Image: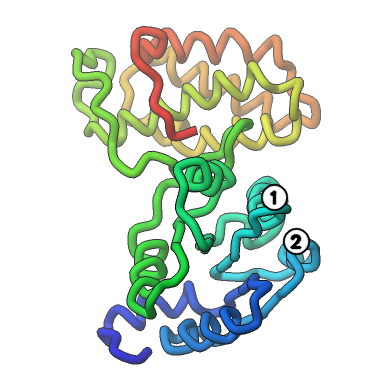
Amino acid sequence: MYGQNPATAQKLKRTLKQVMLLETNPNYARMLADMLRMLGAEHITLYKDPLEAEDKVVGDNYSLIVCAYQPQECESLNLVKKLRRSNAACRKSPVIMIAGEATLSLLNEVRDCGADEFMRKPFTWGDLQKRVEHVSLKARPWIEAVGYVGPDRRRFNSGDYSGPRKRAADLGDEKLQAIEQGVRILKASYEQYASDPAQARRAMYAQLEVLVPACKTIASQQFREDVKVILTQLRMDVPNLEAIRPAIYSLVKFMKIEDRKPPSAA
């Protein structure tokens, strides 16, 4: 906790409780471990083999994962992708990816695998501190879709649509965006159900965390009935997709989704 504000250090304790570090370079591994301890890391588990890390990560509840990118095998990217789609306790834990270069293609790959932050070598203790503070104190909303699982890939709110929102004019803009995004992902997950049934179902269920509370805010009986139909079907061992379809497209029509440019979060 060297050089840290005591109040900030206290807020980072949960993130730094159990850290997984994947680094094949022994010198960088020691340096990173020392930096993490200076930040207040309680327990650090070091892996030098990406395949071993991939095997072990699903069995432990890591609070922070720091991965070094391997340019040839891309195993760290695969590790994060598999973790995000797994049932591991730490599947939503923040991931910081580090690499010796920062090309546009690599940044896109790191973003799309589900990592929270990127850091280029060489870096300072202050650089690492900023990344850890960011994932701890400014965590982005979680996106559970079929094509992507991880923190919201948008850094800023989109201003793509600025027209009237008559259906929910009394809602705050952020709440409305969350509902719209939930309906978009719900529709996309239904349409991609055959490609990955387990993830599609989990993604659809995740959107109900936003849509069910919205039933109390949106003054529409049809909206509530559609959400109820979807929730009822997803609670069944084998959901009836034909029963879900009309409800989903009714929500799409209600929210005027087809009239707007889709966001790029998922």
Q: Is residue 205 above or below residue 257?
A: below
- Residue at image position (45%, 63%) is 120
Could you say where residue 97 lies in the image, as x and y percent from the top left? 53, 60
The circle on residue 224 is none
Label pair 2/1, CB-CB below 8 angstroms: yes
Whole-Å distance between the Cαs marked 2 and 1? Answer: 9 Å
- Label 1 crowd (10 A; few <14 / some 14-19 / many >=20): some
Q: Amino acid at mark 2?
A: Glu
Q: Residue at the location (68% across, 31% down)?
A: 201
Circle 1 sits in a helix, a strand or a loop, which is it? helix
Identify the residue at image location x=75%, y=34%: 198
Circle 2 residues within 10 Å: few <14, some 14–19, many ≥20 = some
Q: How is the image coloured?
A: rainbow
> In the displayed structure, would residue 137 be above or below residue 152?
below
- Answer left or right for 5 relative to 246: left
Query: x, y (%) of residue 109?
Result: 55, 43
Q: Which mark is residue 78?
A: 1
Position of the N terminus by quadrant: bottom left
Which residue is at a point 79% across and 62% down the rendered structure image?
51
Q: Secondary structure at mark 2?
A: helix
169 or 98, which is in the foreground?
A: 98
Q: Residue 185 in the image: x percent, y percent?
A: 52, 26
- What is the x, y in percent for residue 234? 67, 29
Q: Which residue type carries mark 1?
A: Asn
Where is 154 relative to 5, above or below? above
- Left or right: where 104 falls relative to 192: left
Q: In the rendered image, which quarter is residue 202 located in?
A: top right
Which residue is situated farthest in the bottom direction here?
2
**Who is closer to the viewer here, 171 or 201?**
201
Q: Is residue 84 left or right of residue 64?
A: right
Q: Label 2: which residue?
A: 54
